[in-house]
Image (cartoon, rainbow, N blue to C red):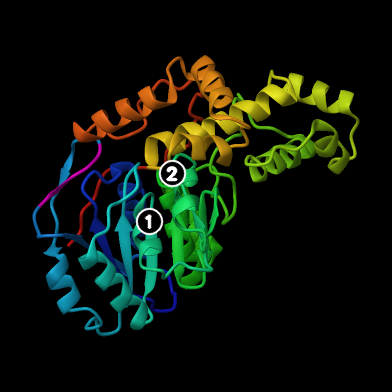
Amino acid sequence: MLNMKATRRLFSLYLVPGFSLQAFSSAVEALRLANEVLESESYAWRIVSDDGHPVRSSCGVTISVDTSLKEERGVLGQRGSFSSAAVVCGGSYPLPVNRAVHGWLRESRARKLGLVGIGSGVFSIAQTGLADGRRCAVHWEQFPSFVEQFPNVVAVQSAYEIDGDTYSCSGGDAAFDMFVQFVIEDYDSFIASRVCEKAAAMRLRQPGDRQRLPLHAGAAIHHDGLLKMIEQMERTLDEPLALEEIAASSRLSRRQVERIFSKQIGRSPAKYYLEMRLERAHLLILNSQLPIVEIAMACGFISASHFSKAYRENYRLAPREARSEAVERRRNGHGTFAAAAPTPLPMARSSIGEMVHAK
């Protein structure tokens, strides 16, 4: 029998219609496995929806819930010895304004409870202003529209972030990594390691770790100079730097930079930079209402015609056609990221065990 200090937490997980089942399951599994390792019910969770009815996930699986948001708000702060957190479980596209959720989050912050955004759930926290000045992890597909909407939030493309009592993750199995951090906070890294062993998780990501491989990278990049140059490109998509400036900051010659990109990425630095800017533009077209010309300027193109030509060559359709298709797919309930995109998704470690719903 483990002899550990007594810690109890209750997580109230609000499910947004179309939430990511992978991310939700990853979070719950981390808590369940922690209880198994600790041989106690140290962690509990309640599943919440708007009206108390089951919620359909993005993959079509419907999850039953414990209570409605109204009932959850009514018992807020009446948890005895439990240390609680309000969790918004989102999916793969930005969330509309929900005043009831915003009220719940504000009440939770007033009671000094933790706020947790999973996937697009971070949009709900940001919409309330409670994330202003905080460092938040945003999924790379949602990142361009997020930074346009919430300039006061320190948005980053990392797996997950912890900034005081604000927790955020990009979704997927990053939710597992983030929730294991609660176990580390409450107990220690030994218990966390046992949890990872049970989940067959080979590596636990730390706050700030990249959420995906760089664009077009087929395997892990071990060249520190290349990673620094890619990060510099990511920060300057609106005002692209000359290759000489990028090379100088890395203390490499232009020829060395071109050789490194060719070997590691399979593209010239200029083509890679252009594709990064086009990817950001593509995501803004699909997930924001910004005019096309403003998107072009925000992604470093000197004219709308130049942008349109480059976009069509890369995505095989015009920007306005891509937006129309995205709107139609969203109207039909198929999400937003379905327009033709040559960028392959990175491979990710899976940490989901069986789905367990404990009441």
Q: Is residue 331 above or below residue 8?
A: above
Q: Is residue 40 visible?
A: no
Q: Residue at x 63, y 36 (%)?
A: 300
The residue indicated by pointer 1 is 123
Q: Residue at x 34, y 60 (%)?
A: 124
Q: Main secondary structure of the magenta part?
A: loop
As shown in the figure, which amino acid type bears the numbered disc 1?
Phe
Horizontal and vertical percent position of residue 218: 60, 24
Label 1 SS: helix
Q: Check residue 177 for magenta coloring.
A: no
Horizontal and vertical percent position of residue 339: 37, 24
| Magenta stretch in the rendered image | 54-58
Compared across the picture, whether 262 is left or right of 6 comes to: right
Question: Quadrant of the image for the C terminus?
Answer: bottom left
Horizontal and vertical percent position of residue 249: 85, 43
Q: Is residue 51 above or below residue 320?
A: below
**How much space separates mark 1 and mark 2, taking CA atoms?**
10 Å
As shown in the figure, which amino acid type bears the numbered disc 2?
Gln
